[in-house]
Image: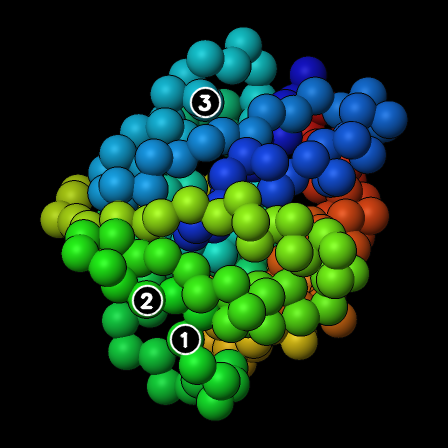
Amino acid sequence: MTTAVFVHGGWHGAWCWDLVRARLDDADVPSVALDLPMTTLEEDAGVVREALERLDDGAVVVGHSWGGSPMTLGASGQGNVRHLVYLAAFLLEAGIPVIEHATRRPTDARPAAETVGDVSIVIPDAAIDAFYNDVPPELAADAVGKLRPFHVSGWTRLETTAVAAWREAPTTYVVCARDLAIHPDEQREMAKNATEVVEFDTGHSPFLSRPDLVADLVIDRVHRYP
């Protein structure tokens, strides 16, 4: 049976998918959520690749935000990938970790993180505004307390001959229309390379604000490829 494989975004962890995965459990859809080391793009992609190689059957891979880049590289060449879902995620060529020349800024608010040495650390209040602007306050406070440092080396471009996974498998891009972390118009631009485009009227983290929407979409994609 097809398994949903969840790849979290920067600073986050596997925990961020818990509400979505609970709904998949209720629907008898198997899932796994990965914990990325958030060190380099190559190492994070390796975690995705190894998870896919361990599966006995097909996979629908779901990446959020930064998680889109390790998914693009790690799922490349993996024959069991049935579908990819980019959830407000970076849909770029393999080896390019983030938008290099963003032309639109989501907000004039202060950055959600600051660099200390070789890691990026969230600024809690600013991160709540950027990541969780439509998440219930108690849930947002709990989430921001779980965020981890992100090695800035993860944003270094990687030279690779790998083909972007979205060039090999059908892909859904989910634009989050009230996103304050990645401008919705930047998302729409990346989504032009997807097979399908869906818009959620949510902020950057619908897995917390609207887990039902995310779960329903993933369940639908899993059922397409039993």
Identity of the amino acid at label 3?
Answer: Leu
Q: Is residue 16 left or right of residue 157?
A: right
Instruction: Identify the coloring.
Output: rainbow
Q: Which secondary structure, mark 1? A: loop
In front: 218, or 178?
Answer: 178
- The reply to whether callout 1 and callout 3 are in contact (CB within 8 Å) is no
Disc marking residue 164: none
In front: 116, or 7?
Answer: 116
Residue furthest right as drawn:
26
Q: In this figure, which residue is indicated by the disc labeled 3?
A: 52
Identity of the amino acid at label 1?
Answer: Pro
Q: Which secondary structure, mark 3? A: helix
Q: What residue is rendered at 47% in x and 76% in y?
A: 186
Q: Which secondary structure, mark 2? A: strand
Disc marking residue 111: 1
Residue 115 percent location from the top left of the image: 26, 63
- The reply to whether callout 1 and callout 2 are in contact (CB within 8 Å) is yes
Q: What residue is rendered at 56% in x and 54% in y?
A: 144
Residue furthest left as drawn:
159
The answer to whether 63 is drawn above or below residue 193 in the figure is above
Q: In this figure, which residue is indicated by the disc labeled 2?
A: 114
How packed mark 2 is, by other alpha carbons closer than 10 Å (few <14, some 14-19, many 20 or more), is few
How packed mark 3 is, by other alpha carbons closer than 10 Å (few <14, some 14-19, many 20 or more), is many
Which circle's residue, 2 or 3, is located before the other in the chain? 3
Residue 180 percent location from the top left of the image: 56, 75
| Quadrant assignment, res 111 | bottom left
Image depth: mark 1 or mark 3 in front:
1
Which circle's residue, 1 or 3, is located before the other in the chain? 3
Residue 83 percent location from the top left of the image: 57, 39
Q: Is residue 56 left or right of residue 197?
A: left
C-alpha gap between disc 1 and disc 3: 34 Å
The answer to whether 48 is drawn above or below residue 157 in the figure is above
